[in-house]
Image: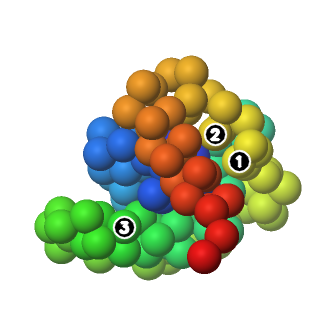
Amino acid sequence: MRLWMVNPKFLCRKHLMGEHLESHMFVGSLNKGTSLNGFVKGGLVDVSKIQSRHDELAKEMVERGYNHKSQIQEIVVDIPKNYYISKVNVEANIEDLKTRCPDCNKRISITEGAQHVSC
């Protein structure tokens, strides 16, 4: 599990839907008391942003015409203080996606190119 935390427009369908599912899984794990230490230490999740990230992903899903009907659960447990030290390296994740997934690479190239075009 991981939250890429990159611009949702960069994500292919598979990675968009996967990260959306994993946001639900992280909340479920937290609420069950399952340790996320490995994910936190590995920089794979920023616990403070799970719920807002879910909303960003859901918005992108709807913009692409996908169905989104799964509201994220509220985190109902006290989150350990050491979970807030983790930061996800977005730039490294962009590079990882570019090499890992041809579809994400294409979306990243198109989206970044569009950002550099002046009107």
- Circle 1 packing at 10 Å, graded few (<14), some (14-19), many (20+), is some
Q: Earlier in the sequence, mark 1 or mark 3?
A: 3
Q: Is residue 69 left or right of residue 88?
A: left
Residue at x-position 54% and y-position 41%: 109
Query: In this view of the protein, which residue sits in the foreground, 118 or 107?
Result: 118
Q: Nearer the viewer, residue 22 or 59?
A: 59
- What secondary structure is marked by label 2? helix
Q: CA distance from mark 2 to mark 1?
A: 6 Å
Residue 94's disc number: 2
Location of residue 45 in the rendering, given as x and y in whole percent from the top left corner? 63, 49
> The C terminus is located in which quarter?
bottom right
**Contact check, label 2 and label 1, Cβ < 8 Å:** yes
Q: Secondary structure at mark 3?
A: helix
Disc 3 target residue: 60
Q: Marks 1 and 3, how far apart in space?
A: 18 Å
Image-based side of 23 in relation to 5, left or right: left
Q: Which mark is residue 100?
A: none
Looking at the rendered structure, the kind of residue marked 3 is Glu
Q: Residue at x 66, y 32 (%)?
A: 95
52 above or below 18?
A: below
For disc 1, the marked residue is 90
Amino acid type shown at disc 1 = Val
Q: Secondary structure at mark 1?
A: helix
Q: Residues within 10 Å of mark 2 (few under 14, many from 20)?
A: many
**Residue 24 found in image quarter:** bottom left
Which color mode does the image show?
rainbow
Q: Residue at x 18, y 73 (%)?
A: 69
